[in-house]
Every structure is written in C-alpha cells, then in structure tokens.
Amino acid sequence: MLKVENLNKYFGKRQVIKNLSFETFEGEVFGFLGPNGAGKTTTIKIIVGLLTMDSGSISVNNSDLNKNFEKALSNIGAIVENPEMYKHLSGVQNLKQYANMRKGITEKRIQEVIELVGLKNRINEKVRKYSLGMRQRLGVAQALLHKPKLLILDEPTNGLDPAGIKELRDILKNLAHKEKIGVMVSSHLMSEMELMCDRVGIIVNGELLKVETIEELIIENSDSKQIYKIGVNDIASAINTLNYIDKENIKRINERYIEISLDSADYEKEIIFINEQLVKAGVGVFELSKRENKKLEDVFIEMTKSGGAQIV
C-alpha cells in the first residue's frame, strides 16, 4: 500500500531523515514509533506532500509520488497533527463542506463514514460541543470520505482520555481488519501501540532501527530465561536447600526474597520441583511469582535509550 525507499531529507545542512525504507500493507495497522523529535512527523509530511524529499522514492498503491503526484495523493487520507473543523457548523455540515471539494462523494458515502466512526447519534450537533475524541473521530471520517486506500494519522491519541483512546483504537483496527484499509499511525505511546498495531517500525534520529510484528519484536528482545521471585520465611535455609542451582541463576534480593532464573523450555517442571524441595526442607513459602514478560514499551526504551532525539 505504501512503499518508502531510501528517503532522505535535509533542513539546511542537517540531515533529519536518513535512508529511510519501509512498506505498509492493506488490512494492517502499521505503527510508526519513535521518541518525540525522531522524525515521524517529517516523514509523514513528505508522504502526504507537505514537504519535499531530497532523495529517495515513495509510492502509494503503486503510484509514484514524484512521477504522479495527484494520483498518489488521491489514495491517501490523513490527519497530520490536529484535525481542523468549522466549530460553528455541525459534524455533518463539516463533512459536506469537505465533500464539496472532492469529486464523486455522495450523500450515501457521507452516511457510511459517519457509521464507520460511530458518530451517528451526535453528527447533527455543532462541533464546538464535541469532545476531543469526537473531533478526532470526525477527522477520521473526513479523511475517509474519498475512499482512500491508505489512512495516515500523526499522533492521533494526543490529549485523549482513556475512553477516547480505546474508541479510536477500535475504529482503526476495524478499518484495517474489516474494511481492508491500510492504516499507518505514528506515536510515542508504546502501551497503546502494542494494543493497536499489527507491525511497527521504530525510528530514532531519522534512522529506521527495525520493522517487525509486535510479537517478533518482544520475543527477539526478551531473555531466554524465565525469572521467578520466591518469598520465604528462612532465607538461609532456602539458599542452602537450593544449593544445586548454579550460582548465576539464583540471587538473594533481601532477607525474605530470592530470585531464580530458569530455562524457558522446562520452567514449569523446575519451579514445581523447587517449591517441593523448599517445603520438604521445612522452609515456608509465602510468595512465588513469575516476572512479567517484556512489553513493547520495555523493548522500545532499550532500543532507543542510546540515541537522543534531536529532529523536529
């Protein structure tokens, strides 16, 4: 749906986008992730024609942006930063104003997008009465009016409350998975992207570090061992009982807790055996908990902590 190849951009002598290459596909939510100032908005502005590229190529639905600008852009619906609306008009009046600037948008299509974004009950109210989340949904409706193949949203969850974020997430996943639209979302909110995206690309200082599914990214950057914290009433006896465990795999945290690293393949059998040995030795076990697996946020911090964000 979108193909970016060897994209470069300079502001004066400063290179802000560096040989950027990635693809997005129909029916997926693609997360474009990076710290504030990493180059996300600059890249998006180039894709939607608001900035020019210095070198590289971009194609949208097989139309080259440099060679066939209007056809490429006709396949894109986008919200860059905040959607702008006429606040004194109703939601449906705003959509009709936009429809007048595009050929072929029917009343039926207007009603379809209203239904898609869940604004049917409030569409006749003036936009000044809308919450930020409702204005975001109206912006998505506007971006969808001309039936684009690719929807691009730049930081769409900024300022939304948890309910608004969930509503928008559900809408975007529905558009991708059921309506088969390619959706590209930029953000620095990792917990939300983990719930929303099928694949993610991570950008730092204008360079793309990696493009993978959420699952692949987490597995690749997770430890090969499972780590358990065990709370006991006699720390010395517990450590003595478990003296058969390699020293590098057992750690005393304090007077009441130890931490044990187990091979992920057999960790269930091993932790059951360890618990049995402690009980047989008369050690009271009052807590046994597995350390939570890494989240996308943990992986993101590890991957980006070495580079300071300087691009705007």
Image (cartoon, rainbow, N blue to C red):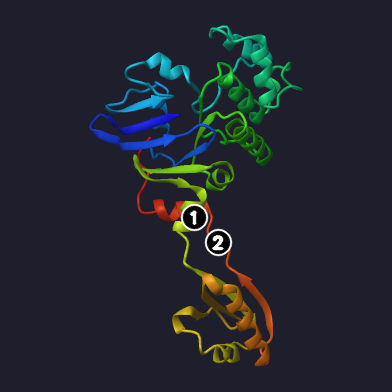
- Amino acid found under the numbered disc labelled 2: Asn
- Amino acid found under the numbered disc labelled 1: Ile
Quadrant location, the N terminus: top left
Q: Residue placed at 68% from the left, 14% from the top?
A: 92
Q: Earlier in the sequence, mark 2 or mark 1?
A: 1
Quadrant location, the C terminus: top left
Q: Is residue 14 visible?
A: yes
Circle number at residue 293: 2
Camera-side residue of 280 and 122: 280
Q: Is residue 88 visible?
A: no
Question: Residue 160, position in %: x, y?
Answer: 62, 36
**Which residue is farthest right?**
121
Circle number at residue 218: 1
Question: Residue 249, position in %: x, y?
Answer: 48, 79
Task: Judge from the rendering whether residue 298 lies leftward or rightward of residue 97; answer left or right.
Answer: left
Question: Residue 107, position in %: x, y?
Answer: 67, 10
What distance separates the C-alpha of mark 2 from that of mark 1? 9 Å
Q: Residue placed at 63% from the left, 88% from the top?
A: 277
Q: Mark 2 packing: few (<14 Cα in 10 Å), some, or many (20+)?
A: few
- The mark total stands at 2
Tag 2–tag 1 contact (CB < 8 Å): yes
Task: Give the structural element (helix, strand or loop) at label 2.
Answer: loop
Q: Residue placed at 55% from the left, 74% from the top?
A: 266
Which quarter of the figure has residue 17? top left
Q: Mark 1 packing: few (<14 Cα in 10 Å), some, or many (20+)?
A: some
